[in-house]
Image (cartoon, grey):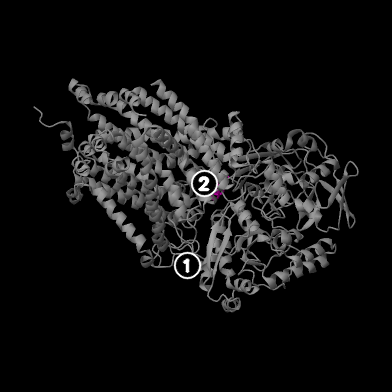
Amino acid sequence: MAQQAEVLVAAPRPRVNLRVLRRWRRYPLASAAAVVIVLFLLIAIFAPLLAPYDPAATDGVNRLQSPSWDHPFGTDSLGRDVLSREIHGARVSLQVAVLAVVVAAGIGVPFGLISGYFGGIVDALVMRVTDAVIAFPSLVLALTLVLVLEPSVSTLMIALGIGAAPSYARLVRSQVLSLKHMEYVTAARSIGAGHARIICLHLWPATIPSVIVAGSLTMGTAILAEAALSFLGVGVRPPTPTWGGMLNEAFTQIYVAPFLSFFPGLAIFIVTLSFNLLGDGIRDILDPRLRTAEGA
Amino acid sequence: MTSYVIRRILQMPVVALLVTFSLFVVMHALPGDPIYAMIGESESTLDEETIDRLREDLGLNDPIVVQYFNWMGDVLRGDLGRSFRDRADISQQIIDRIPTTLQLAVLSLAVAVCIGVPAGTIAAVKRNSLIDVGVTLFAMFGIAVPNFWFSMLLIWLFVITLDWLPASGFVGIWEDPVAAMKHMAMPVTALGLTLSGSIMRYTRSSVLEVLNQDYIRTARAKGLAETSVIVRHALRNSLLPVVTIIGLQLGNLLAGSVIIETMFAIPGLGRMAITAIRGRDYPSLQGVVLLFTMVVLIVNLITDMSYALLDPRVRYSYGATS
Amino acid sequence: MRSENYWQRRNRKGISRRRLIQAAGLAGAAMVLGAGPIACGGDDDDAGSNGTGSNGAGNNSTPRSEADGSPKRGGTLIVRRPSATTFADPHRSSSGYDPTVNHLYAAPLLSMQGGQLGPSLIEEWEQVDETTVNLKLRSGLVFTDGTPVTAEAVKYSLERQADPAIGAPRRAVLKGVNVEATEELLATLKFDQPNATFLESLAMNAPGGVGALISPTAHQQMGDDRFNESPVSVGPFKIEKLALDGESVFVANPDWPITAPNGDKLPYLDRVIIKVIPETAVAVAELQSGGIDVDYVFLSENVPQIEAQDDLAVNLNKGAITQRIGIHLSKPPTDSVAFRKALAYAFDREEFAAVFTQGLGGPGRGPLTELTWAYDPSAPTYSYDEKKAREHLAQAGLADGTKLNINTYTSGVYPRIGEMIQAQLRKFGIDLTVDNLEVPVIVEKYRRNGEYWLGLEGGGAPQGDPYQYLESNFGTSNQPGGTPMPEIDALLEKALRTFDNEERKKIYGEIIQLDYDQVYKIWLIEAPTLAGHRKNVHGLEWLRSGSAMDLSAAWKS
């Protein structure tokens, strides 16, 4: 009986009108971005098959070759094929980005839910902690964390995830704050639904759309952050190539082989841009209010 | 309202405490004794006695909490301690470097605002025009470009190829404005680029939202000239979110300065932070992070307060929620 | 009557979706095209080495850049270093790059030219007997605080450096040394046991030696910390402004009594500025544009940039650095001689030399190079032999390979050398993990705790007597994980007590032979240290350590 009543007053789930997806032509940039991302995902997954050479194979004789048919992106200072390294680099970058977002959401969302729902001291405490993390200069935080644990994909994802978690917490919290006064929540509580049930069944699903948007945008940030850490020399261990690490090496060779700087940076740029555009596009789709304002 | 302000001010030390304590703990978990950092790059014989004596002197044998409280006590007396690396006075070092990083940060901010705000406004006003598209694309590019890559491209173009600008170093703007501008041109562009992108986007959406409001229609109906409408009504009301964004981006600015200062050999706080992390120089890093944290907190407090002051709706709502 | 609202009117004036896409495409294309020249505008450099001839060093003398004409007076020299000066206090400096700076304002007691000891603050010295040395100070020397330089200062300085709290890197050489100020300008050193090589450590300041003098008055007044902020010593230059991580300025000391060999008053320069520039690319740019005059941490791979410009030159210190792999000798499997021999045969040292020294250096042959009189060209060396490597691997029972790890420094070419080592070992089935670590971590994890099997090391090849070098490479006190080396220690002890150079050379030869037989280290690369400088800079000399320079006789034309 109680369950039935609950269903009657269930949360108005946001309708992701799938028909909207068919009108992808209305969102050209976001669609293009989605295609690009899928492309890079495929590249990352099938890297060993796609890369023409072994990314770690050195060849002292053929070092610093300009782009040519043999080596479309040229070779680096140890004679390794840059194209193959770029392809493999996608693996690390995307891996770290996705995992960082998972960690960030995994930490931030529950905290946000709890903080917003219970309020009071719990809320104050969580908010101060998030303030602290935000106030910390992000690069310093990530650097220190990576140096404590050793540089590896898992460390990077934890470091970046922790840095990004507060924004999720705040996002979810502000949504919960407005939602928890809504009728269906009060109704659910009036029929005796427990806190956990309310949070998981009613509140959390409502936050999913904005979390997805935030997720896409955070991926962009995570890719940039991982590149920055690799550039500073605290990224994943060799011989695994990362785009940021390749830029690091490229900088030392900038006189002799400027072309080395071009490709890794471009890759970072394109992927970050795509995630940003995708996030914007998703937000446009999901948020009707913004849609009318933009007049799309 | 005042109670809100007081509460916020009281919360600041708590946050600062949290930040510095967690940093303390993390730094102490870092592998690599700071004593070894002092021995440096050359080969040298290590000696148990030397090491133990040094550890004792620097108080490294005390439990972490004790060390932390000692540090806190000193800080409250205005003494940030001495660097482990070269025994220099940290407060003095920080004071020496503040003008440098400040010059970099302020110039970057100024450039970003001067480009971002007008561009965002025009983009909003001439919505869906070519200008709008151009601005939006530029903003997206700015946000997505890694600033160290952009720096490399700038160096390649302006230093190596064209030889127009010096590659490194810092000149105070008071000493020699022209030279300062030449030295700052690339770092400021690199740092300002991302920031200008964010500012552009926020300005644009904020102005758009304002332009949609009734009072704008009223102003137009009254027959005011379009420019007047934009400047006197729309801009003033849309600047608030922009100010907030600046406050939020300050953290990113400081983080970005770490890389930029290293690349362009600018002796500022960012570089001090990196050197401290690499050298396990706990006190120096504590000092720099404390400064950064306080700056970010204070700036956020000011922007929040001005938000509350200028927007009555916000002011009243703060009474209701926590 | 208007039926549309403001926005509908706006939209009519606006562009269609198609134009939006076109614009985006155009912008993207513009970006790609604009950045294209960077990608394809790379130079037509061929990948090989541009083996330029070195500037001499067939013998022990340090090479000079062209010393045409007679030295001119005046001018400011701007010198770059890649990292911050560690300490201004000349007793505590811990970076190999520091002596370029601290020799400016703190001249060491003795000097070293071409591997031979020479006078400096000490005018004359006398080995009275096997355990006593008399040092006679030059008269009329004055510290920058006005107090006179006396034997008391010598005693004070040496005893301070022996104090563990100061952390002087070469503190160990002062064990068993007693200093007495027998007269105002005469200091007597008494050794517990005969010591043939001690005097060499007076020819350099920290970290390579203990030769710096400080003013006892000033130090007692200031205490260690403030003394580090403004050290008081005596040298060819005086400190005008100290910024360890920025720009430091030094001005000529008008009362400097030591003259050049041709009798000229030194120094020639008015000022020296030391600038810290971490990024190599930026430093090269500054050198090319004239922002700096000398970069004494120049990399071989940037030599083409020097050659591209008429007003730049390179001062080459051939064979000054050896880059080698240190091995944990008591951790299986590297505790097996057969395995270590396999490793010694496994590396193609020519490839390393080609990639990392651009033909200016060569493959590693052993611990010593021609820079020292103790070098024996007939000593055996290892070279690349895949067959022998596999044989020894099989002998060690590791024909299928194994897992190892190596640590390297984080800066310069070391991370890449690590990657090449990793690449070259793969064909033997050896799976090598490379960790780029900061020095303090290396010291803790590798040297103290022995957590690594291999460590990539680099250091100055000795000029003059190689005792300290051999001791730090092979002696027990420096072995990762503390492996005891009794035979080496015994030989080193014997060498220390032997005053006859020929005898000592033989003992060193025995140590080298032991290293060859037991493969204590793998000698990969012999690299030069380079100073890139503007052609109008002359008189640059390399210090004994190979990684720092002596600027006291430099001049600009």
Question: What amino acid is found at the position of numbered circle 2 in the picture?
Answer: Thr
How far apart in space, not on screen, are marks 2 and 1 (Cα)?
A: 32 Å
Residue A144 image label: 2
Residue A206 image label: none
Residue at x 53%, y 50% (from the top left corner): A147
Q: Quadrant of residue B56?
A: top right
Q: Is residue C341 magenta?
A: no
Q: Is residue C20 left or right of residue B243?
A: left
Question: What amino acid is found at the position of numbered circle 1 in the picture?
Answer: Ala
Residue C501 position, x and y percent, is: 82, 64
- Residue located farthest toward the left when viewing the structure as drawn: C1
Q: Is residue C283 magenta?
A: yes
Q: Are marks 2 and 1 on the same chain?
A: yes
Whether residue B234 is visible, yes or no, is yes
Q: Relative to C340, say whether B168 is above or below.
A: above
Q: Quadrant of residue C406?
A: bottom right
Task: Determine whether the residue tagged by mark 1 lies in a helix, strand or loop.
Answer: loop
Whether residue C551 is visible, yes or no, is no
Q: Chain of mark 1?
A: A
Q: Nearer the viewer, residue A63 or B255?
A: B255
Residue at x 48%, y 46% (from the top left corner): A142
Residue A57 image label: 1
Q: Is residue B137 left or right of residue C86?
A: left
Density class for disc 1 (Cα within 10 Å; few <14, some 14-19, many ≥20) is some
Residue at x 70%, y 69% (from the top left corner): C515
Residue C114 position, x and y percent, is: 75, 58
